[in-house]
Amino acid sequence: MDNNHIHLTLNIWRQETPSLKGYFEEFKQDVSPDSSLLEILDEINNRLEAEGKRPIAFESDCREGICGTCGLVVNGHPHGPLPKTATCQLHMRNFNDGETLFIEPFRATAFPIIKDLIVDRSGFDKIQQAGGFVSFNAGSAPDANSILIPKKIADLALDAAECIGCGACVAACKNSSAMLFVSAKVSQFAILPQGQPERYERVQAMVKVMDENLFGSCTNTYACEAECPKGISVSNIARMNREYISAKFKTEELVD
Amino acid sequence: MIKLDSHVPEGNISEKWPNHKFSMKLVNPANKRKYDIIVVGTGLAGASAAATLGELGYKVKAFSYHDSPRRAHSIAAQGGINAAKNYQNDADSVFRLFYDTVKGGDFRSREANVYRLADVSNNIIDQCVAQGVPFAREYGGMLANRSFGGAQVSRTFYARGETGQQLLLGAYGSLNRQIHLGNVTMFSRREMLDLVVVNGKAQGIIVRNLVTGEIESYSAQAVILATGGYMNVYFLSTNAMNSNATASWRAHKRGAVFANPCYTQIHPTCLPVHGEAQSKLVLMSESLRNDGRIWVPKKIGDTRSPKDIPEAERDYYLERKYPAFGNLVPRDVASRNAKYVCDEGRGVGGGRAVYLDFSEAFNRIGKEGVKDKYGNLFDMYQNITGTDPYEVPMQIYPAPHYAMGGLWVDYNLMSNVPGLFVLGEANFSDHGANRLGASALMQGLADGYFVVPYTLGNYLTTEKPAKVDPKSNEFKEAENNVKENVSKLLNVNGKQTVDSIHKRLGHILIDKVGMSRSETGLKQAIKSISELREEFWKDVKIVGKGNELNQTLERAGRVSDFLELGELMAIDALNRNESCGGHFREEYQTVEGEALRRDDEYSYVAAWEFKKPGVWELNKENLEFDNIKLATRSYK
């Protein structure tokens, strides 16, 4: 592996508390092309700590692109310029010597900043709590193979279920819409037989809580799909719209 | 000394759990809501336990240091989950899964627990499918299976390379439903920093609110820890950045004994280390060993590119040494052999990596066939290394991955502190000295969905724990303990960063308490770690305050615990004068270089009782093998 370091200028968003005004702080850094962007932030933080200065607050956990914890806007792109890549999987070999990077938190009214690059995404949990499940108690399941599911359907459901809940779709959208996130879960259960009993209640309940939590409307720009680290398709949004309309017709007598 | 009673029920192995379920006392449905239960950690084990207890009607408080339960590191498990369904008609059975797990664990686990695990494995698959987990399917609509290391049957259920994610999101859904119904209250961004013990019983926890820095007390009639494993003690591991041992360790210091800390799993199929700045190691699912062949050059220091090394000059060392299991030997065997060939200087380019080569599979099922099975893993490899694995063989090297050791629990998953239950990777119970692939997800969900919901009720009805006021003296004492600890850390005001000390601890451990251990090395490790711990408390530097979001302070607390745990790992490894599973002592090997177990002297669980930092007392639980004959583990 290559050990030729490259030199980068990083402008990183600093904001000590939610109410204080934020600003960009500039850092010059020699980096290994094999390091990830988050490892560069680790290095900067170690240097700051050794100098007794306040390190940059940012979140990450698995660093394998699956937990959805990390999420930074790099040069205007949530999770950076590479398609289908979470911030933690963004390696410095994708940047050129002498390049300048701007690193910011996800920005949306629904994701208030807590500190520096950390935002509050609890709105996502609230939406899932409203209906992102099959109502079913442990212990009462039939044999797993008694529910037959065509391979194509299982694959389609998994395509939607792969969403990592990072919030890049919201950060990418000019309306801060969470439609891609919500539709991924709605689609998974609309497609699968297990989701049928609560199909119409689910979509209405989740959309209602989505709206209550200050996420905007979808105007079909597809920015969400373009920035999604898992490549979740906007066709899920179309499906959710169909489900929502169908629910209005089908469940008048069943749902408030 | 503590008397460790495993409380394994009487009777034939297959009847123990059914009989126990019948003989346990029940809590009347209307009374369940009178009980407050704390669940710490909301990964597979914690989320499934919290959800199921909520379904039963208990009042549950669930805690996570993440912003959401969906972030827990269970989510990163790739390969799959085992169950004894025998859907492939390949002569699998509960007994065979039980047998494979006991043998895979090198005969250092408790038979009764493992049998129950194998027994409920089938319920887990039913449960997850009913939740809408999109497992891989065959064209006829049936569930698909693949094989995994340490087994000769296909019993692993999977969802691409994202099985852990799908299972965790299933449990997260069930948890969300209970939060919605008001049975579970979720406390996110809280880190448990102490256990509250009142009259000998676990009655609550002290947490730090990670956003405000406030120290908060929560009271309950039982506490369930499902806080994962401790492999980040090595600094570089496949665990998530925040995975830590603090909740378990603080409970240990309140009296819970810690079992088999030296049983650590170094996973064979991880990406090699790229440099000093590396923050963690990335695992590639071991399912890759189904179709990938592992080899190194026969010649020492061969620097030719792999395509220039002819077949005759390659050493497929696992296939050569273990013809029956080949590339699918258990993890400890695969890892140790990778270390040996690299120690000989036969690693890739003379370094610390071996090839994982898919050329044979490309010829057999085509690149498309390989892509269908492992596409996302190949993408991940290319993304991280910048090399295309469809063109150039992958390079892999072992990395610290899973802790078999953990807090000691009895058959009911209760620690020696009454009312403190421990689930999933945080306990020591099911994997002995080595865990087989696709068994961690199985254990986490078995514990949470199907074991603790029963055994907890029995504890509540027999022991009748009281409701304790969180303003009582015991809570105040624990709160002060936490506050003092936080201010002690902040007041050291030395020169070294938390990470730099953690890295040094990691180097000591991987070198001396890693894949291969010796008496001399372990004695050095014990000395170096205790010196490093002193250095930490004299010279660590933590910027910022306690009453704010302070990630350095969070890490410092965790590293201070790792500095105690690391020493205990070395002490435990030194005490165990034998080789078994992930614990390989150089003094104890066969003439062929395989692990030499010493059943007469070491067929016991080593459960360590904390006396003071650096001082522990050994307690033993003898292991009886009534159903599986103790034998030398052979994969030849």
Image (cartoon, coloured by chain):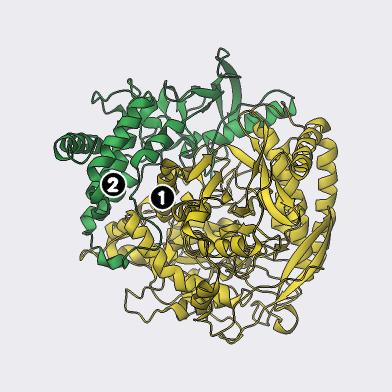
Chain colours: A green, B yellow
CA distance for labels 1 and 2: 15 Å
Image spot of residue B350 (x, y percent): 60, 58
Image spot of residue B552 (x, y percent): 68, 33
Q: Amino acid at mark 1?
A: Ser
Residue placed most toward the observer, B492 or A94: B492
Helix, strand or loop at disc 2?
A: helix
The answer to which image quadrant residue B406 occupies is bottom right
Q: Is residue B76 left or right of residue A163?
A: right
The answer to which image quadrant residue B132 occupies is bottom left
Image spot of residue B326 (x, y percent): 47, 75
The residue sitting at the top extreme is A21
The answer to which image quadrant residue B456 occupies is bottom right
Q: Which residue is mark 2?
A: A188
Task: Work out which quarter of the rendered image holds the N terminus of chain B and state it.
Answer: bottom right
Q: Amino acid at mark 2?
A: Gln
| Badge number at residue B174 | 1
Is B482 placed above or below B105 here?
Answer: above
Q: Is residue A207 left or right of residue B154?
A: left
Is B184 placed above or below B604 here?
Answer: above
